[in-house]
Image: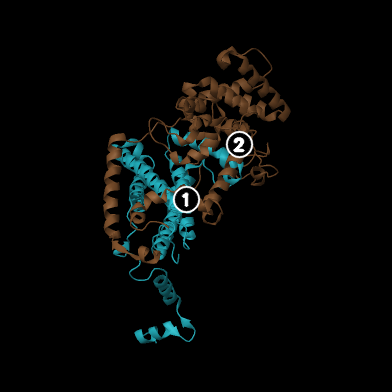
Chain colours: A cyan, B brown
Amino acid sequence: MTTAQGGMARVSGPSGPSWTARFRGRVARTVPPGQALPDRQPAYVASAIYVFGVLTLAAFVVVLVTGGVLAIGGSVWWHTSGLGHFTNSTHLWSVELFFAFMVIHLWGKFFMAAWRGKRALTWMTGVVCFLGSIGTAFTGYLVQSNFDSQWISTQAKDGLNSVGVGAFFNVLNPAQMLLWHVVLLPVVVGIITVLHLVLVRRHGVVPPIGEEEGA
Amino acid sequence: MTAIATKATRPYDLVKEFVIALAVVALLTVGLAAVFSSPDEKAITLQSWATSAPNDVVATAAAELAGTSTSAGYGGPYNTNAVGQTLGPLKLQKWAGVTTPVDSANDLVIKPLSQLQGSPLLSLALATWRNASPDEQTKWATAYSDALGKAPDGNPSAVARGSYGPVPVLTTAYLQQAQAGGLDGALAEPGFYGGNSTKSLLLLADGTYLEDQARARNLGGDQWGMMNETGNYPGQPWLWLYTFWYQVPPFNTSDNADAQVWALMALLSLGLLLLPFIPGLRSLPKYLGVYRIIWRRHYRAHPLR
């Protein structure tokens, strides 16, 4: 049978719920309804430092949009067109803002010891985001097809080669770096960012030091 | 106490906050881009290199033929002519193998020259080179390379007479090929993606011109290197800790500085990642006390005991 009822029956058959049902259940348990985007926060969430996580996320969106437009224009566009050059400028400055916000966010969370109360994974995904973003920005500098990218790639190759990474990650090949910069690394950073946000919402905002849960 | 104190809530619209943040960042980005623009200094082509610094091109070509250029004696991933950098007993560079094979003399000089047609003198020089033994080739090229080093400004026309075999003819033709723009195309590698600059960048980096240009723009390794950017732009300040190590002992004098700095940065990154589990370090924020400023309103209402 392929009726709706038949389908429903198969979801909770003798062998247990289907993988899709299990997935939905897992998501619901991870971030229960109302926890993803609550309309209230603990009263202690009253400091400018809390804004920098959201600012980092906003800057990441601007980085993706400006980078996307730049990629569509092609690697030559921004050298030959005023609009292309301006788009490149927006990409550069959104990246600068992204890192500025992220570093302030990271330092803020360090001073708050934000890993307390089973939030270690939240901290760790944040650190991986930071390191992944450095790799992404680095590959961005390599694909500029100008003097900077020539110099940075010839310098960076020595560091990467010295520990064997250069054998698999050739910074002297801008075409390979473009793939890393536009597709692979943004996808990885994007996925870890989502995981980071889910963990932030799941565990909530860390309480002030000295007032841990159950203290 | 604190269970009640930390359970108090206040209205907080996350969606509204994000939308406002997005608008602010977008406006800030456009504003900064409009005011400060972005750097874009033209790439150095092999043709522009040959036009601006012809003697450097000849010296580099001679060094490639003599096997004394940086790329010729580099080791992995380009060749097996050196162990490369080591990290104590770990020879990671060598162990990773040769994945991008580059035979500097042949790939960077002889093969591009072989594409030139119509010069009997060059054809004869190439044939002489190919028919010579490796020892003879090295002897000729080394002698010419040394003579260039002694000539005023490395000027090929001022080189003392000597036994250089076909090398002067080869390097002269090489310079002409570069000046005519033929070398850029000859070193470009065809392939699915195209745009592989490995050989041309290795060649350019073997000369002194690229580094001279970089140093003039404060981009040298001992000038905080690739953290900077051409012009008055912020560059990559997030690399400050990586580039910092190259400025201080023992790294700034070590032959294995790259491997050592990479190992150190890997260790520090691991430390940052595992900070929540490292006794002492994980308690640092408590002793630094900055948290008292962050949560000052809360502590004002609920003083710590």
The first of marks 1 and 2 along the sequence is 2
Percent of width and height locating residue B217: 44, 27
Indicate the quadrant where residue A202 lies: bottom left
Q: Secondary structure at mark 2?
A: helix
Whether residue A47 is visible, yes or no, is: yes
Tags 1 and 2 on a common chain: yes
**Which residue, given by chain and number where applicable, does mark 2 sit on?**
B257
Residue reaching furthest to the front = B305
Q: Secondary structure at mark 1?
A: helix
Indicate the quadrant where residue A5 lies: bottom left
Whether residue B101 is visible, yes or no, is: no
The residue shown at (38%, 30%) is B232
Around disc 1, counting alpha carbons within 10 Å, would you say few (fewer than 14), some (14 to 19), or many (20 or more)? some
Q: Which mark is residue B285?
A: 1
The residue shown at (61%, 40%) is B260
Which sits in the foreground, A146 or A8? Answer: A8
| Three-letter amino acid code of the residue under disc 1 | Pro
Percent of width and height locating residue B210: 50, 28
